[in-house]
Image: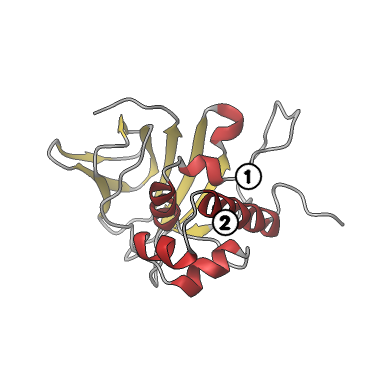
Amino acid sequence: MPETPTDDAFIGQSLGRAIREARTTRKLSMRALATAADISQPFLSTIENGQTMPSLATLYRIAKVLGISPSELLPAMPEPEVIHLSRADGGPWAPIADVVNAGTHRVISSADARGATVQEYRIEPGQYMGDWFESDGDLTVYVVAGRITVTIEGRGEWELGAGDAIAHPGALRNRWSVVGDDPVRIVLVYAVGDRKP
């Protein structure tokens, strides 16, 4: 049976191919991209070959070095698709960071089709949530369960509980941290745009 755009293998291979094509178009060696993105060359090779799914943080670092939006590297949903259904047990899930015991996330809907990427995060007590993060576009963070603190560098710190949300330009360096011992579920909406902070 042929792979479809929702299969893990299809997504991994498409993402790897997009990274490789963007790298070669910019005349970057694999070593140069890996060094600039702070990953090893062998790890980049497995990503480009579709054998490994990069974490969200790694994907953003790679895209930043390539000078493009992370959403441009994600495979587009096939046309003409007007309705996209994402089930609770759907996937694929990937680690937030390339460390042991990291929280996980999955793409629910991609920007190529809808102008915004929607991602779901699951962080269990004690799991790593990543460090400082920045991107282009605008971010909206919605807490489904649990409590987190959102820190925006130079702007402030906000504690969010279930039902709370915060929106801000992705260019503002930000990070999340878990408050308490309960599991956390977050929905992140990344809207493509060029608004400046």
**Residue 76 percent coordinates (x, y):** 64, 39
Quadrant assignment for the N terminus: bottom right
Query: In screen coordinates, is 76 left or right of 1?
Result: left
**Residue 39 percent coordinates (x, y):** 40, 67
Amino acid at dot 2: Arg
Q: Within 10 Å of the Cα at label 2, are there few (<14), some (14-19), or many (20+) other Cα atoms?
A: many
The residue at which mark 1 appears reads as: 75
Residue 31 in which image quadrant: bottom left
Quadrant assignment for the C terminus: top left
| Residue drawn at x 25%, y 44% as measured from the top left | 174
Q: Secondary structure at mark 2?
A: helix
Query: In screen coordinates, is 103 left or right of 16?
Result: left
Q: Secondary structure at mark 1?
A: loop
Q: Nearer the viewer, mark 1 or mark 2?
A: 2
Total of numbered circles in the picture? 2
The residue at which mark 2 appears reads as: 20
| Residue drawn at x 60%, y 55% as measured from the top left | 92
**Residue 36 percent coordinates (x, y):** 35, 60
**Residue 104 percent coordinates (x, y):** 46, 58
**Label 1 vs 2, first from the N-terminus:** 2
Residue 181 in which image quadrant: bottom left
* Nearer to us in this view, 112 or 95: 112
Residue 180 in which image quadrant: bottom left
Query: In screen coordinates, is 134 left or right of 70?
Result: left
Query: In screen coordinates, is 188 left or right of 157?
Result: right
| Residue drawn at x 57%, y 56% as measured from the top left | 20
Using the image, tell me which numbered label, if any, was put on residue 186. none
Amino acid at dot 1: Pro
**Rendered view: 125 above or below 74:** below
